[in-house]
Each structure stands twice: as structure tokens, then as C-alpha cells.
Image: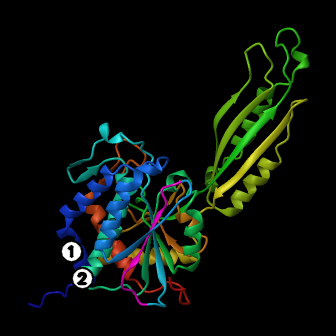
Amino acid sequence: MEHPRETVADRILGHLRARRADFVSYVEELLRAESPSTEPRAFAAIHRALQRGLDSAGCRVTHVPGRRSAGMLLALPRERKRGRAFQLVAGHCDTVWPAGTLREMPVQMADGKLRGPGAFDMKGGLAQVVFALHALDVLDLEPEVTPAVLVTSDEEIGSIDSQSLIERLARRADRALVLEPALGLVGKLKTARKGTGHFDVVVRGRASHAGIAPEEGASAILELSHVIQKLFALNDPNRGVTVNVGTVSGGLRSNVVAPESRAAVDVRVLTWDDARSVERAVAEIIPVTPGVTIEIDGGFDRSPMEATPRNQVLWRLARNLGADLGVALEEGTSGGASDGNITSLYTATLDGLGPVGDGAHAKREYIDIDRTLERCALLALLLLAPPVRDAHSPSV
């Protein structure tokens, strides 16, 4: 009886499954190298581990210094053909966890799940790209579109240093593959993300004695209560618009009419049209309390990652490649932002290619090793895919 011929997908997945123990060990090494976003000096160990891993996968790694962060690592194949289109593989090595978290949240492997600070978001994803590239190198599979791997250290604090480099690379890239964790326990790929906006509200009134001369005052807190109701009225669940007044402050004492009050506002939207609509509505807020003034500053700092036609082309490619691996993939929308929001403005983008697990930014954070290895194989197949643009992209 003739046996079915082994496919490229079979070869890659088989190779990665054979290296399961090595994969676990490498993720554990990354987890023990604590890398909080706000402590740039803490990144030496994680950068060494990533440089060594990418070097073993056939890459030359360059460190790009940051002004307020630990900088970025840019990895390109040591041997590559000039003039080829390139694809951006984007990830971040910073986490929300402060140094010392390992004492209360140790690295643990049990029941096929690896736990530790940053395992899900997103050190497991960084291990995926190292092992995917290594698999292609060992199996002598050369991507037609050159991989350019960018690992940043400031994504959790708004990509304060790396955004300009991400934009420059994304403008020229054939596509962007973002290694953020998968969505939900079913492991959906992220084909859309909400854009994020932040507004600061300052209301200024006039102080007076609340018992003796309340009529001489103008309460900033009273006015802020009206502003808050107007802001919450902008919520529209059917359109995916969320407006949340997260903090409020103000006043001097209970017996003083408040001369000032403040609020911090978070806004999430699915489309640029909704972003502009919210900005107009916020700008139109005027005081209703005599004697007070309102100042509202801010705006949208992360554009929505919309389900554009070119993003959908990349999603369908991933879904078909998943079928080759025997993995049924689903797509979904995330309420949070990532560097995929940036790349999607300039090139076809697929997000959520990182680990399958749960607990981003939570103490239960973990990755499912076997399902994450399947994601690693999917990433390798995507790296092998031909260009997705109609015309050839510029080379890197």
C-alpha cells in the first residue's frame, strides 16, 4: 500500500514536536530573565537570550538603542538574497510585571502548561519565532519573502521609542506577523483590534464656604458629574464604542464648594469613523453650571486595526495553512491595542499568532505548550508563504 507523501506542514510540525523539551527550556529561560517595561537596565539577560536564540536560527542581530526604553532588537537572516521583499515579524520582550515577581509567581511546568510572568504576553511568542526560523533553517526551507524580526522593549508602555521604527518597517513590508497571544481559550487569531484614546478633563469653578455662602461658589464637582454622564452616554455596545471614566478627583474639604475637579477617560473604538465621532462629541461638551470652565485634552494614540481587505487576505492564508496542520482556526476582535494597530495602517497585518493560553497581565498567566507548538508551525508556514501584495515590496 502506498503511503501518503509527507507534506511541508508535516515536516515542520514533526520537527517542532521533537524539540518540545528544548522549546520549554528556552521559554523558561526567557521567563526567568525578568524584563519590566519601566526598568530598562533589567533587559540585559533577556536580550542576551534572544540574541543567542536568533543567532542559532541563522540571523544577524542588531541592537537599536532607545531613549526611554531598553531599545529594540532587529534580526535579519545572515544569508539573504538582496532585492527580495521582506515581512515584518513583530514582538515585544517587556512585561507588566515588576522585578522580583518570580518570588511570588515562579516558573512552573505542569499538565502541559507553562506558567510564569510574561509567558502568555508574550515571551512564548518570542520563542515561537526563534524555533520557527530554526526549523526552516534545519529543514532547508528558504522563505521567498525575507523575515525581519523586530523585538521591542516598550510595547506595554505605548511603544514610546519603537513606534517610529515600526512605522518605517511596516511601510515597506509585504506583511506584518504579530506575535501577541491568541484570543481566548480557543486560540483565535486577531484580525481586528480596537483603537485607544485617552482624555483628561479639568473643571475649574469657584470656592466658597459651603454653609455660610454656598451661592458665592461654583462647584467643579457638580459640573464634573454632568460631564461624566455625557461621556458615559457616548457608549455604544452595538458599534463597539466604549467610554470609561476611570479616575476622578477634586475638591478641598467637605465644607468647601469645590474649585477644581479632574477625570481621566479611556475610549475604545473599532473604526476611525467612530474615533472621529467620539472626538467631535467630546469637543462639543460645554458647562451647564454657571461660573465654571471645562478643559479637555487628549485624543486617540492608537488607531484601530480594522478588518481591511488586505488583512483578510492574510487571515484566509493563515486559515488555509492551519488546515494543512490539522488545526481549525477562528478569527476574532480584541478590545486591547498592540503594535499590530500601527502596522495595519501600512501593510497587511495578522495578530494573535503567539501562544495559546490565558491570563495576560494576571497571576494565572500560562501557555499550553502543545497548542503553542502548533502555532509555531503555523508561523513557519506563514514565513514560507509568497508575497501577499499585488506588487513586489521593497527589500530590507
133 shown above or below 80: above
Q: Amino acid at mark 1?
A: His
Cβ atoms under marks 2 and 1 closer than 8 Å: yes
228 shown above or below 368: above
Q: Nearer the viewer, residue 231 or 60?
A: 60
Residue 113 is left or right of residue 351, and the answer is: left
Tell me where the magenta segment starts and ends, as one range: 69-81
- Where in the figure is residue 138, as x and y percent of width and height? 24, 80
The mark nearer the N terminus, 2 or 1, is 1
Taking the magenta stretch, the answer to whether it contains residue 74 is yes
Write the residue at 55% across / 62% down. Answer: 162
For disc 2, the marked residue is 139
| Displayed quadrant of residue 148 | bottom left
Write the residue at 28% across / 72% down. Answer: 56
- Where in the figure is residue 283, as x and y percent of width and height? 81, 49
Quadrant the N terminus occupies: bottom left
- Where in the figure is residue 265, as x and y percent of width and height? 66, 42
Residue 21 is left or right of residue 44, and the answer is: left
Write the residue at 59% across / 76% down. Answer: 171
For disc 1, the marked residue is 15
Q: Is residue 305 visible?
A: no
316 shown above or below 239: below
